[in-house]
Image (spheres, helix red, strand yellow):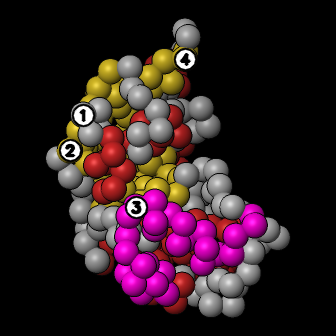
C-alpha cells in the first residue's frame, strides 16, 4: 500500500505539487491522471524516492520514505518515464544486473527472470542486446527489471506510451495479473479507454492538487457524464476556471 500525505514540491516560484494526498491500495489498480504540467511525474518521482518533497510524507507498506529510502525502494517496482536500458546488454542481462543490485542469489535470479520472460512473452528477444529494440520490447524488459525482486507495490509511468495494439493489450493483461496477485498497482496514463478498463480508483491532479479521487463510475456520476473522458474534461475545466 502506498500512502501520500500533503506532498509539496516547488521549483523556484513554481509550485509543481501543492498538497497532494491519496492512497493506492493493495489488490487494486489506481490511476493517476492530469493534464500536462499538472504535477503527476513530479509526484511519482517523490514516491519512488528520486526526488525529495519540500513537505509531506510518503509511506510504502507503513515505511516512511524520508526515514528509510532504501527500504522503500526494496518494496517498490518502478517503470519510470525514461526506460533507461543498458544497450550493450541483452534483455536477460539487464534484468540480472538489477537483480544483483537488489542482492538476490543467483539461483533465485534465474528462476524469477525466466518466469517474467514467460509472463511478458519475451522469449523471442530475451537473448538479444537491447540496442535496436522496439518500444514494446524496451517496455517489457524495463518492467521485468522492475519486478525481478518481487515487489508488492508497482509504479508505472505511462507504461503503454508508444506501444502498438498487441503490445498494449498484453501489458494491460499483465497489469490485471499483478492486481489479482494482490499487489498495489499505481500508474499514470493519458488514455481514457485504458483507465476506464483497468482502474479501481482514479486520482485526478490539476495545478499540483488532487481535484478528484473516486472510482470511474463515481466520477461519471459526479459529473453527470456518460463516459470517463467527458468526466475528466469537465473536472479539469472546472479546476482551471477556479484557478483563473
Name the residue tied to disc 4. 11
Q: Measuring 33% from the left and 41% from the top, which residue is drawn there?
A: 69
Name the residue tied to disc 2. 63
> Marks 2/4: CA distance?
26 Å
Q: Earlier in the sequence, mark 3 or mark 2?
A: 2
Residue 188 in the figure: left or right of residue 105: right
**CB-based contact (under 8 Å), mark 2 and mark 1:** yes
**CB-based contact (under 8 Å), mark 3 and mark 4:** no
At which x and y percent is residue 243?
A: 49, 18
Q: Residues within 10 Å of mark 3 (few under 14, many from 20)?
A: few
In the rendered image, is residue 234 in sight? no
In the rendered image, is residue 122 in sight? yes
> Marks 2/1: CA distance?
8 Å
Q: Residue 106 magenta-drawn? A: yes
Name the residue tied to disc 3. 102
**CB-based contact (under 8 Å), mark 3 and mark 1:** no
Q: Earlier in the sequence, mark 3 or mark 4?
A: 4
Stretch in magenta: 87-114
Callout in the foreground (2, 4): 2
Q: Residue furthest left?
A: 62
Quadrant (top left/top right/bottom left/bottom right) for the C terminus: top right
**CB-based contact (under 8 Å), mark 2 and mark 4:** no
Callout in the foreground (2, 1): 1
Q: Measuring 61% from the left and 74% from the top, which residue is drawn there?
A: 93
Quadrant (top left/top right/bottom left/bottom right) for the N terminus: bottom left
> Marks 3/2: CA distance?
18 Å
| Vertical placement of residue 217 versus 92, above or below | above
Amino acid at each position: 500500500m502506498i500512502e501520500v500525505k500533503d506532498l509539496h514540491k516547488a521549483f523556484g516560484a513554481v509550485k509543481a505539487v501543492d498538497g497532494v494526498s491519496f492512497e493506492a491500495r493493495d489488490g487494486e489498480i489506481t490511476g493517476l491522471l492530469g493534464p500536462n504540467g499538472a504535477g503527476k511525474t513530479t509526484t511519482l518521482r517523490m514516491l519512488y524516492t528520486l526526488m525529495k518533497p519540500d513537505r509531506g510524507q510518503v509511506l510504502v507498506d507503513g515505511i516512511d520514505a524520508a526515514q528509510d529510502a532504501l527500504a522503500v525502494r526494496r518494496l517498490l517496482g518502478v517503470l519510470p518515464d525514461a526506460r533507461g536500458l543498458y544497450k550493450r546488454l541483452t534483455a536477460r542481462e539487464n534484468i540480472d544486473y538489477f537483480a544483483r543490485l537488489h542482492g538476490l542469489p543467483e539461483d533465485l535470479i534465474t528462476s524469477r527472470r525466466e518466469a517474467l520472460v514467460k509472463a511478458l512473452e519475451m522469449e523471442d528477444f530475451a537473448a538479444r542486446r537491447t540496442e535496436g529494440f522496439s518500444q514494446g520490447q524496451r517496455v517489457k524488459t524495463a518492467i521485468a527489471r522492475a519486478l525481478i525482486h518481487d515487489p508488492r507495490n508497482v509504479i508505472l509511468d505511462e507504461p503503454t506510451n508508444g506501444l502498438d495494439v498487441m503490445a498494449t493489450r498484453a501489458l494491460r493483461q499483465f497489469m490485471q495479473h499483478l492486481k489479482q496477485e494482490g499487489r498495489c498497482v499505481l500508474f499514470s496514463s493519458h488514455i481514457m479507454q485504458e483507465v476506464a478498463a483497468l482502474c479501481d480508483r482514479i486520482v485526478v491532479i490539476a495545478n499540483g492538487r488532487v481535484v478528484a479521487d473516486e472510482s470511474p463510475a463515481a466520477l461519471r456520476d459526479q459529473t453527470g457524464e456518460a463516459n470517463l473522458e467527458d468526466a475528466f474534461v469537465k473536472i479539469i475545466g472546472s479546476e482551471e476556471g477556479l484557478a483563473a
